Structure formats: C-alpha cells, structure tokens
Amino acid sequence: MHKLIEFIHSIYLVVLFIVLEALAIGYYARSTYFTQARLLARSSAAAGAVHEFFADIHRYFRLDAQNRILLDRVAFLEERLAQYDEAANIDRLRSYMLDIGESKFRVMTATVVSNTINRPQNFLTINRGLSDGVVPDMAVLTPGGSMLGYVIDCIDRYSVVIPVLNTSFRASGKLEGTDYFGSIYWDGIDPHSVLLSELSKYAQPKRGQKVVTTGFSQFFPENVLIGWVESASMNENRTSYTVRLRLASDFARLTDVVLVENRDANVILDLQARQETDERLRNE
C-alpha cells in the first residue's frame, strides 16, 4: 500500500497535466462550429484513409442506385442535345454558344469519407482538397442536383463541409415559380426536414410545392432543389409563414457529391461589403 501511494505521488503531476490538457482541448473543440470544422479538417489527414476505405465499400453496394441517377442524367442531356440538333439555324446556335464564354460556375466531383446526421452540428468530410482545386465557400450538391451544404475548410487532400443538417447552417430559399423567399435552417430535430422561415403571408405555400435556392447566396446557383413543402403555419402576428420542408437530399445514404464554385463569389461579397459600409456611413 505504501509503494502504491509512493507511485501515485511520483506520477500525479503528469496525470494532472494530461487531464487538464484534455479538458482544455475538449472545451476548445466545442467552442464554435468553425473550431470543430478546423479540428475535423486537420484530423482528417490522419483518419481520411480509413474513412475512405469504408466509404468505398459502402459506395460499392450503392452502385446500382448511382447508376440509375447517372442514366437519368444522361437521358436528360441526350434530350437537350437532340433539341439543339433540331435547331433551325445551327450556325446561329454555335455563334451563340461561343459568345457565352466561360461559365461562371466551376464543377467537380468528390466522395464522402465521413458523415454524421445525429448531432446538432453535423459535418461532412470529402476526399478532395486544396491540391484538387477545392476552395472554401464552394456549394456541395447531390449527384441529382439537390442542395447539401458548402465547403468551410480545406487541407491538401480533404475538405470539410457544413451541411444543411447543422444548426449553424443558413441559406435562402423560395417557392418555385414565385418571388416569395425566406431563410432555410435546421432545427436539429428531424434529419429529413428543415424549416423555411420569414416567408411572406401572401405566399400561400401548398403541400408538395417545390422549394429551391434563390441565387441571393454566394454559395449556391439559383433554382437548386432544396425540398418540398410538408406543412406551414402563420406566426403569432400573422405576418409570415414558417414552413417545414421534406429534404430532397438523403444524408443517411450519401456517398458521392458535386462541388460547384461560383467564380463571381468574390465580386458579390465585395459589393455586399461596400453596400454595408455605405449604409453604415449614412447612418453615422
């Protein structure tokens, strides 16, 4: 017993130091969602290979579903190509396509190597990073074209995505075919649905109606599918609706994603910052 006490006395400072370090790191990791993302990105460099191995196995068993999505996409593109081929004036069409120039969107694909859906602040890790041309603020979509989230941090070979299923996520959405829009966010309850708040009282949302992105955000192109209206309720002042949407994206079965960069994002951000500065100066 005396030797045990002497042994504990000889190492208690080391044990105390380790415990305090663990508590400090744990507190720091939970301080903000951005901190969590940064730590996740760094740890992905070590754990990425293991996650990617199991993701490859999972993706293998979902090849049939992915092939069906690709076949539907090919069929759609083939139909559009046939429409172009049937144009009355092919030379005019070619001239028009040349005048368009470079698209303002840059697109690439990636594989999900880590994903959670049962926490208030979930994140995705994908197997593309700075060396592949991934940059923060790139939109992340499903292969079918529905909204997933956007990139918030990158390292050389991996990137971290904040998905819709994160209570810190915000985006704008509108009822398809209308100008009525609101704010998209997740209340942390159901991983299959999100909320659309501050929707005008004149919108009159209907069950099953599509909700798409507005294009106001620097992250997402316009008219990206978010989900469908499940229910709607008016606020206490009867000035706006809060709408619950059924998500088009199934996060529980996610294997591959599409990344989209808005080449004009920096211009948009600069204009917004300039406008905010002007308004602040006018108010002063």
Image (tube, rainbow, N blue to C red):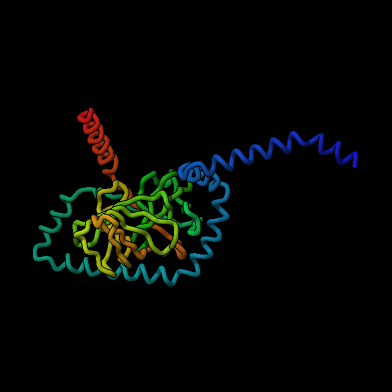
Residue at the spot 57% in from the left edge and 50% down from the top edge: 47
Left or right of 79, for residue 14: right
Which residue is at the far right? 2
Identify the residue at horizontal 26%, vertical 55% (top origin).
Answer: 237
Image quadrant in which the N terminus is located: top right
Determine which quarter of the picture holds residue 239.
bottom left
On the rendered image, what quadrant is the C terminus found in? top left
Q: Residue at x 36, y 69 (%)?
A: 69
| Residue 281: percent from left, percent from top | 22, 28
Q: Where is residue 85 in the image (x, y as percent from the top left)?
A: 17, 66
> In this view of the protein, can residue 244 be seen by the observer?
yes
Q: How many labels does the image show?
A: 0
Residue name at image x 27 percent, y 65 percent: 210
Q: In this view, does 80 lie to the left or right of 225?
A: left
- The x and y percentages for residue 119 are 50, 55
Q: Quadrant of residue 266?
A: top left
- Residue 54 position in % (x across, y down): 55, 61
Q: Which of 83 and 237 is in front in this view?
A: 237
**In the orientation shown, which residue stands out farthest toward the front?**
236
Going by the image, does 118 lie left or right of 136?
right
Q: Is residue 22 left or right of residue 242?
A: right
Residue 145 appears anywhere in the view: no
Q: Which of 74 and 260 is in front in this view?
A: 260
Image position of 283 with respect to 59: above or below: above
Query: 28 or 251, which lies in front?
Result: 28
